[in-house]
């Protein structure tokens, strides 16, 4: 944005005269008048119990054979298989009809299913080799056109070489919450389930479907899709499941199975109805995909387990995914086979044992706890204990950056098994009984062990906090240094209401604001939610790194760029990135506003723009060792700011004397008489004169060349820098040299000094002196 400045030159030849300087911008116009060489600044802003389990038909294969095949995480659902809703009006333009069902199963022309009989017919059709060779060589798309009901005989898919996608999305008022329903009225012990996969290496997706409802609440405890063959993948996206009788959503027992959850999913089994069993009989890998939210209620009077694992089970909660489980089952895993829970960055996993049949409305569990809504049910699940396993085996937990893991109970404590936890900068791992008089963990029939390894990538100190039982509990803390483990805990569990692993020093986040004014252009930052459980032998430092790149950098990269060399960037013509810090002696034990503000500091001398700001705490122990919290980040914007100082007037009589040189009387300009143009802007500015405007009282003409010797009152006037360019001829400003002024912090190059020089041909001795009265106009623009 260009600015215009006027330098008013008004004088007789021998008496210089006072004039205003005006800087004009779109936001403001300010004028100051004075007689000094330097005028006012004018600025503008641009601004343990064994269980008995029924077995299916022998035709389905033995469900008691375990697989020792090593599992690996595989996401087999490609983006090309993503379900797309195709409206009936479009279907009507398609002529394809196979076995009386509209559609051919391609993405553009999916099978349109109106009844479960039609669904079974589609399953039979697409399970033939001729279908894939002559009709559709790609994925099979099946679109529900209505709520459909299975009366007991399921839809069986087999030998399908490509993915099958069943989509129940609808905009019709006949659907519930934008989804059609698949209901069931058959036997709870039907071994094939509502759907089944009859061969290996298959991939099936259930998208946007309600399975069951409060008015049609029968299901089958062989899952809504049964798979006993190897290497099959099920993808669940935006599915709601409800059952009061026969509730068990998944029966997936083939080796190397994969079960993926995408989007928002809800599973509820909570009633005194019969045959309500596990959430899943499963072997393989269960992935809760990135950004998904999955809520599970599995509380009935048939206690059993949450998962009946046929071999080792791995549960992966991917980045930013949330899982909330309410279980009233005696075991989390049955039988005694090891399990792995892995949490990626920012993942959240909560397992809440509650033997009451009342449960939290799944639609509210991902908000604040105060907003949870209870669905009232009478009775209990008959669980007599709360175990990780029915015997002693190992639950391996890996929790990555900013993830959180909660094992909560309001009744029996967790017991049995080995808990082996590795934390890679997790935010918190909690074992807690919501009844303060009861313990979170117990010794049980088998002596459990609890180990915790601080595998930090950021040199973070962790705190193992133990809170005793009672109304006035005591809290003890054990600090775990980087790459260290606690002494394995094997006894005393019954003494503690909660056992929590969390960073000994923590911050919740960072706030930053950008500001600009005359000779000020900075990002001010402070950390939020600051607290420490360490004693007073530790000292701290809040550290900030400001980057002109808004791309989020990883912790290691930021740490490599950060420097404690200077609290303010060195004097330079350009500043984009920089570091700043503030020393702290203590931190509050509980986060507070006072503690937050004590970390405040600012990085000054920054160019306009949007910055990514990183902040952390450095912790120093009495031996001089340093530890750190993970970097938090936010953005801040600095607006452009323009501010200049010009001489308010020029006294020409102070700039020259009459001298005779070579017998000729003339003017001699004093090159020591200097005038200054300076910038207090926060950006590089280009300045140049654009015009000399004659005022009404002016009697002298400016010329570009040397004036004549007669009395024609002509003047050649130059504005010449005392150091380098520019050298402006004020008689000819058609293409003047541009003067570049650096931001205010470059104290050498943010200003220029100049003097006047020139010749004059007017009368030297007269009774009436010639008047010189001009405005010199400058333009200014950000470079």
Image: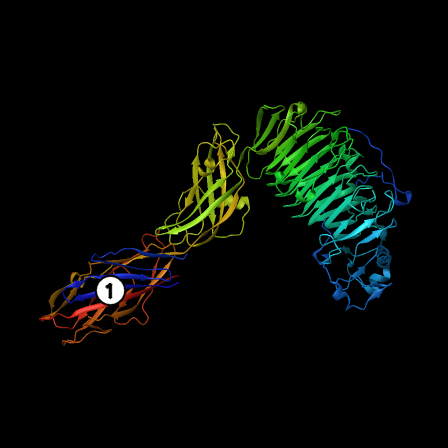
Q: Is residue 558 above or below residue 116?
A: above
Q: Residue at x 63, y 35 (%)?
A: 429
Of residues 675 and 374, the one drawn nearer to the viewer in this rendering: 374
Q: Relative to 700, is 141 on the left or the right?
A: right
Q: Look at mark 1 in the image and give the residue it sits on.
A: 8
Q: How many marks?
A: 1
Report the colour scheme: rainbow
Q: Position of residue 453 (x, y in %)?
A: 62, 33
Quadrant occupied by the C terminus: bottom left
Q: Position of residue 451 (x, y in %)?
A: 65, 30
Quadrant occupied by the N terminus: bottom left
Q: Is residue 311 above or below residue 497?
A: below
* Quarter occupied by residue 384: top right
Of residues 466 and 301, the one drawn nearer to the viewer in this rendering: 301
Of residues 202 and 748, the one drawn nearer to the viewer in this rendering: 202
Q: Residue at x 45, y 36 (%)?
A: 594
Is any part of residue 648 visible from this angle? yes
Q: Position of residue 136 (x, y in %)?
A: 80, 63
Q: Position of residue 591 (x, y in %)?
A: 51, 35
Question: Label 1: how many residues lie within 10 Å, few (<14), some (14-19) or many (20+)?
Answer: many
Q: Relative to 59, is 429 on the left or the right?
A: left
Residue sticking out furthest to the right: 58
Is any part of residue 72 visible from this angle? no
* Quarter occupied by residue 470: top right
């Amino acid at each position: 944005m260009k600015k215009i400045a006027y330098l008013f030159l008004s004088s007789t030849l021998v008496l210089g005269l006072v004039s205003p300087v005006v800087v004009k911008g779109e936001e403001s116009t300010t004028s100051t008048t004075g007689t000094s060489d330097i005028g006012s600044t004018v600025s503008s802003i641009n601004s343990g119990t064994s269980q008995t389990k029924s077995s299916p038909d022998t035709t389905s294969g033995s469900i008691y054979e375990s697989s020792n095949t090593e599992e690996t995480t595989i996401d087999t659902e490609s983006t090309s298989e993503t379900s797309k809703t195709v409206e009936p009006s479009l279907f009507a333009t398609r002529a394809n009809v196979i076995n009386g069902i509209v559609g051919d199963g391609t993405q553009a022309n999916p099978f349109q299913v109106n009844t479960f009989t039609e669904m079974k017919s589609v399953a039979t059709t697409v399970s033939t080799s001729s279908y894939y060779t002559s009709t559709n060589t790609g994925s099979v798309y099946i679109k529900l056109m209505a709520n459909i009901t299975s009366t007991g005989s399921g839809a069986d898919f087999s030998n399908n070489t490509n993915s099958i996608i069943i989509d129940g999305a609808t905009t019709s008022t006949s659907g519930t919450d934008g989804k059609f329903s698949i209901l069931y009225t058959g036997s709870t012990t039907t071994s094939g389930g509502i759907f089944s996969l009859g061969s290996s290496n298959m991939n099936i997706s259930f998208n946007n479907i309600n399975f069951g409802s409060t008015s049609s609440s029968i299901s089958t405890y062989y899952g809504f899709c049964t798979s006993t063959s190897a290497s099959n993948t099920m993808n669940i996206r935006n599915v709601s499941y409800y059952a009061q009788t026969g509730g068990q959503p998944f029966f997936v027992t083939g080796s190397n199975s994969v079960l993926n959850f995408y989007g928002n999913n809800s599973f509820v089994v909570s009633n005194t109805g019969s045959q309500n069993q596990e959430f899943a009989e499963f072997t393989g890998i269960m992935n809760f995909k990135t950004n998904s939210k999955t809520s599970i209620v599995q509380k009935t009077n048939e206690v059993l387990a949450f998962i009946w694992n046929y071999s080792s089970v791995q549960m992966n909660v991917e980045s930013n995914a949330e899982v909330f489980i309410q279980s009233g089952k005696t075991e989390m895993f049955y039988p005694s086979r090891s399990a792995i829970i892995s949490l990626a960055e920012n993942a959240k996993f909560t397992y809440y044992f509650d033997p009451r049949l009342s449960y939290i409305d799944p639609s509210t569990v991902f908000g604040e706890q105060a907003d949870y809504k209870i669905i009232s049910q009478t009775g209990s699940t008959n669980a007599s204990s709360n175990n990780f396993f029915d015997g002693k085996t190992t639950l391996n937990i890996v929790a990555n950056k900013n993830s959180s893991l909660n094992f909560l109970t309001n009744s029996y404590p967790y017991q049995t098994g080995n808990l082996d936890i590795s934390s890679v900068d997790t935010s918190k791992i909690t074992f807690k009984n919501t009844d303060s008089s009861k313990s979170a963990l117990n010794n049980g029939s088998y002596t459990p062990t609890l180990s915790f390894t601080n595998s930090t990538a950021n040199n973070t100190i962790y705190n193992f906090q133990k809170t005793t039982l009672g109304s006035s509990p005591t809290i003890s803390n054990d600090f775990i240094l980087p790459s260290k483990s606690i002494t394995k805990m094997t006894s005393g569990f019954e003494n503690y209401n909660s056992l929590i692993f969390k960073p000994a020093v923590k911050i919740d986040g960072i706030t930053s604001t950008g500001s600009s004014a005359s000779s000020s252009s900075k990002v001010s930052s402070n950390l939020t939610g600051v607290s420490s459980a360490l004693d007073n032998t530790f000292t701290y430092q809040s550290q900030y790194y400001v980057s002109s790149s808004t791309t989020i950098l990883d912790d290691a990269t930021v740490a490599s760029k950060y420097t404690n060399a200077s609290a303010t960037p060195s004097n330079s013509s350009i500043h984009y990135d920089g570091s700043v810090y503030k020393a702290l002696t203590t931190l509050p034990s509980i986060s507070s506003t006072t503690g937050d503000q004590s970390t405040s500091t600012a990085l000054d001398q920054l160019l306009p723009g949007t910055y990514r700001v990183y902040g952390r705490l450095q912790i120093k122990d009495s031996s001089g060792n340093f530890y750190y919290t993970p970097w938090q980040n936010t953005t801040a914007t600095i607006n452009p700011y323009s501010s200049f100082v010009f001489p308010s007037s020029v006294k020409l009589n102070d700039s020259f004397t009459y001298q005779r040189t070579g017998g000729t009387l003339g003017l001699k300009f004093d090159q020591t008489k200097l005038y200054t143009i300076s910038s207090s802007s926060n950006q590089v500015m280009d300045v140049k004169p654009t015009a000399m405007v004659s005022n009404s009282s002016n009697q002298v003409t400016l010329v570009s060349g040397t004036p004549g010797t007669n009395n024609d009152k002509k003047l050649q006037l130059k504005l010449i820098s005392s150091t380098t360019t520019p050298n402006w001829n004020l008689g000819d400003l058609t293409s003047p040299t541009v003067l570049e002024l650096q931001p205010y912090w470059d104290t050498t190059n943010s200003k220029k000094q100049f003097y006047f020089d020139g010749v004059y041909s007017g009368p030297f001795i007269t009774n009436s002196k010639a008047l010189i009265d001009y405005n010199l106009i400058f333009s200014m623009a950000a470079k």
